[in-house]
Amino acid sequence: MGVAAGMVAAAAAIAWFALATLIAAAVLALAIVLPAWAAALIVGVVLFVVAAALILAGRAMIRAATPLAPRRSLDAVQEDIAWIRNTTEQLKTSE
């Protein structure tokens, strides 16, 4: 299991570097027709817009999700409390 986890981690690291290389390639490709600073600025802004869109979409999905409270567990605890109260009341009245 440890070797497999190491392989997955290595693949993730290599994919991260591949993404960085592709971003650098996009900057260099734009630098053919624009000054390098403008190419880097455009690619950076595009990446920022993509990140902002992903953040907004993720936040909307989280807000739309059902409540994160464990509803069944809360219901069970409330039933237990009611049972305990009922039992203690019965014990008080039987004495």
Image (spheres, rainbow, N blue to C red):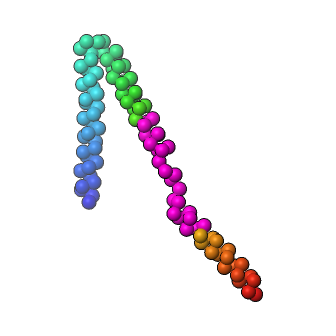
Residue at position x 29%, y 31% from top? 20
Residue at the far bottom: name it: 95
The quadrant of the picture occupied by the C terminus is bottom right
Judging depth in this view, the residue of 40 and 61 nearest the camera is 61
**Residue 17 is covered by the magenta coloring:** no
Residue at position x 73%, y 86% from top? 94
Measured from the top left, where is residue 54 in percent x and y?
40, 35
- Is 92 placed left or right of 78 in the picture? right
Extent of the magenta region: 55-78
- The answer to which image quadrant residue 46 occupies is top left
**Residue 61 is covered by the magenta coloring:** yes
Measured from the top left, where is residue 77 in percent x and y?
58, 67
The quadrant of the picture occupied by the N terminus is bottom left
Judging depth in this view, the residue of 3 and 15 nearest the camera is 15
Residue at position x 43%, y 40% from top? 58
Measured from the top left, where is residue 64 in percent x and y?
48, 44
Measured from the top left, where is residue 5 in percent x and y?
27, 54
